[in-house]
Image (spheres, grey):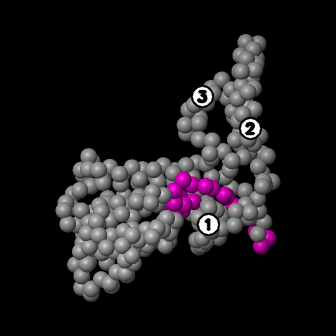
Amino acid sequence: MKTITITSVPGYDEWRTASRECLAQSIPPENIIWQSAESIQDDLFGDSEQLMPAPRGQVKHSIPKTVLMLIQYALCHRDVSRFALCYRVLWRVVFENKNLIKLKTDDDIMQLITLAKAVKRDAYKMSAFLRFREVVHDEQEHFIAWYEPEHFSLEVKLDFFQTRFKNMRWSILTPYRAAHWDTEKLVLEDNPDPSVFPDDDRIEKYWLTYYANIFNPARIKKSAMLSSMPKKYWKNMPETSLIDDMIKQSDARARKMIVDGNKR
């Protein structure tokens, strides 16, 4: 029995290297215990031997790109079983069925797709709910955001932020990693200090005024709003501080809109 501990987060590169070596040594999934840095447990068998380096000239396995993409997303999930699941799928694709990914009713494939979809959804919410605040660093404007994703999805969205805010100096901080962009290069930092995120900035009051003015009290659908923007994201979104009061005042504001409309 082999025990493999992935110490990095999300762990894709470590997992890929270990998986290649396991495939080269023909180690089946049931003979591997996968552990993550956040959930290390004692090996009941007391066997923590290291993998032998893969031999030179080893056979290179052809893995469909769709499988690799799903695996890369799934490994960004917080599910502690993700490493074992992804290796099991990889093993089955190599040794059992190259077209395994097409079997949508297969238990492993369904679970893999579920994990990947959750990460994609989490990454999308980052682009929708993340808010920057301005600071001055080395006499230059710098924008900082603090965000708490459900999964390890920061890396999934970095291309988006680099493209969208290419000419802006920014930092995105999460509980496990930060990304710093200076308009030319991207630097990743593990376990950043959240205290560098400012409490407010000079333009935030204008954004709050704008948000309050575009709010339509006649079109409130609170359940739909909470479905697309759950309350757990509200604490890092300045405009959400206005929502409760705007909802309480919505009936009166809607009636006033009707009265004003009838006067015209």
Q: Secondary structure at mark 1?
A: strand
Residues at discs 1 and 3 in contact (Cβ within 8 Å): no
Q: Mark 2: which amino acid? A: Leu
- Left or right of residue 162, residue 192 in this image: right
Quadrant of the rendered structure where residue 31 is? bottom left
| Range covered by the magenta-colored residues | 138-161
Residue wearing tag 3 = 221
Residue 103 % position (x, y):
24, 50
Sequence-wise first label, 2 or 3 = 3
Work out which quarter of the rendered image holds the C terminus and state it: top right
Looking at the picture, tell me which residue is in the foreground, 256 or 97: 97
Residue sitting at x 78%, y 53%: 200
Residue 254 % position (x, y):
71, 21
Residue wearing tag 1 = 178
Instruction: Tell me if residue 45 can be seen.
Output: yes
Instruction: Tell me if residue 60 can be seen.
Output: no
Residue wearing tag 2 = 242
Q: Secondary structure at mark 2?
A: helix
Report the Cα–Cα distance between label 2 and label 3.
16 Å
Quadrant of the rendered structure where residue 172 is? bottom right
Residue 178 % position (x, y):
61, 66
Report the Cα–Cα distance between label 1 and label 3.
35 Å
Q: Residues within 10 Å of mark 2 (few under 14, many from 20)?
A: few
Residue sitting at x 54%, y 53%: 150
Q: Mark 3: which amino acid? A: Lys
